[in-house]
Every structure is written in C-alpha cells, then in structure tokens.
Amino acid sequence: MRSNGPLALVFHTLFVVFMLAPLVIVCIVAFTPQGYLSLPTQGLSLRWFKAIFAYPEFLRAFYTSLWLAALSSGIVIALAVPAALAIARYRFVGREAITALFMSPLMVPHVVLGIAFLRFFTQIGLSGSFTGLVLSHCLIIFPFALRLVLAASYGMDRRIEQAAISLGAGALTVFRRVTLPLILPGIVSGWLLAAINSFDEVTMTVFIASPATSTLPVRMFLYLQDNIDPLIAAISACLIALTAALLFVFDRLYGLDRLFAGAAK
C-alpha cells in the first residue's frame, strides 16, 4: 500500500483548513466584547453568550428544532426500513421508478418545495402548524435515511436469516433477532443524517413556519435581516460545541467510523 506523498499531505492539510477555518472564525468572533462583528477581537468576553438568554425566542426555537428533527427522523426511519428491505430483496415491476420517486426530493429545489407546501397546507388548514412542519421535513429527509438503510440492506448476508429459519425461527423473530441487528448501522447512521438535515433546514421551512413554530435556523435567518451583532456567532458557537460533544459521545458508544463504514458496505 502506497503512502501519501508530499503533495497529497499538502492537499489534505489545505482541505482540512478550508473546512475548519469558518468554524474557528465564528467561534473567535463569538467571544468579542464589541457590539459589532470584529476580527481580531479586542479581548475575550462572554457578553454575547449571556445575551442569548435575553432572547427566549431563540431558546424556544431551539427546542422546536430538536423535537422536529427527532420526530421527523424517527418517522422516516420507520418508513425507510421496510422500503429498503423490499427494494433490496425483491424484483418487481416499477422497482426502479419507485426508488427514483423516493429519491426525487433531492432533485427539487427547496424553494419550490416551500412554495408548494405553503399553498398545500393553506388549502388543508395546516398552514403554520407543527404537523405541517413534520410532514414537510419527513419528505425532504426521507432520501437520506433510505439511502443508508438501503446500503446496509444490500450488504446484509441473507444466509444468516435462512439459517435462523431452518432452525425454526418465525418471521418476527428473524427480523427482531437477525435482520434488525444486521442493518442497525444503516438505521442509526440514517437517523443521524436525517436529523442533521432536518435541524439544519431553513430554505423550505421559512415558507411554512409560523412565529409559534419557527425553528432555530429560521429564527437566526430572520434576526440577521435586521441585526449584525455577534449574537448569531455566539449561538453558532454553542451549536458547534453541542455537535462536537454529540459526535464524541456517539463515537465513544458506537464508533462513528465503524458505524458509517458498516452502513456503506
């Protein structure tokens, strides 16, 4: 196996710097004592982190985003598992068309989806409701969950299931004791990726959310329209720290490298 040469190491270093530099800059700006965005900062201060608690709408929006991401991801995983197993195991008329239909939200601009959902939910009385947010987020994150569960389903050795059946296990027992553990990496990684995309979604959500159901990205977007102070940088730094902590926890519990590698097999 060939080792990376000097050019490869330089490329990898520049790539890592390119990816991390915006996050580092945001975190530095969040600690500025100034009332405006400034870099370099004149000292360090927790002024803008304390200011977050003076805006309870951001805290409410954060809880809304968490609940929305968890609920939407749970729903799409419950739908993605049977869909992925059916697509991976059976050959039937329209199989490719159904797969393309499930993946089609990836090809539609979120602005178009936002306008379409706004019109649709207004017609059926769900405009600005949390139920409408859940339904719309389920649509756009379903392809992410399905793709990873489908990859795990394709990589599963069905001879293990056949061995369990030959030993007298029923269909439910085989699914619970054999199939589900084998595709669990795809389920967990699919849930994580779906939850991240749901939490981060702003383009479509800004069309269908009401003031009572605004998510954190939408609230931040609206705040930036009228303000240029470092409060958003402080909120972003908190989200970066929270994400890093969650990744560390998942890595300790499951091993993210093994988790995503298992889903990709």
Image: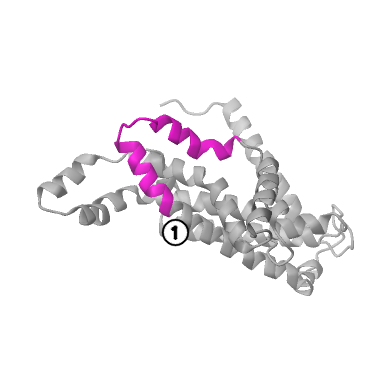
Q: Give the quarter of the figure containing the N terminus.
A: top left
Residue 153 locus on image (x, y percent): 34, 41
- As for residue 89 lying within the magenta part, the answer is yes
Q: Residue at x 70, y 42 (%)?
A: 111
Main SS type for the magenta part? helix
Can residue 190 be seen in this snapshot? yes
Q: Could you say which quadrant of the image residue 49 lies in?
A: bottom right
- As for residue 204 lying within the magenta part, the answer is no
Is residue 156 depicted above or below 32 in this figure? above
Q: Residues within 10 Å of mark 1 (few under 14, many from 20)?
A: few
Residue 248 locus on image (x, y percent): 51, 58
Residue 198 locus on image (x, y percent): 59, 53
| Type of colouring | one colour
Is residue 234 depicted above or below 103 in this figure? below
Can residue 262 be seen in this snapshot? no
Q: Give the quarter of the figure containing the C terminus.
A: top left
Q: Which is more toward the observer, 63 or 231? A: 63
Q: Which is more toward the observer, 71 or 55? A: 71
Q: Residue at x 23, y 56 (%)?
A: 172
* Amino acid type of the residue that numbered disc 1 sits on in the rendered structure: Arg
Callout 1 secondary element = helix
Q: Which residues are magenta?
A: 78-107
103 on left or right of 180: right
Q: Residue at x 45, y 31 (%)?
A: 97
Q: Could you say which quadrant of the image residue 85 lies in?
A: top left
Q: Could you say which quadrant of the image residue 108 lies in?
A: top right
Q: Which residue is labeled 1 in the image?
A: 252
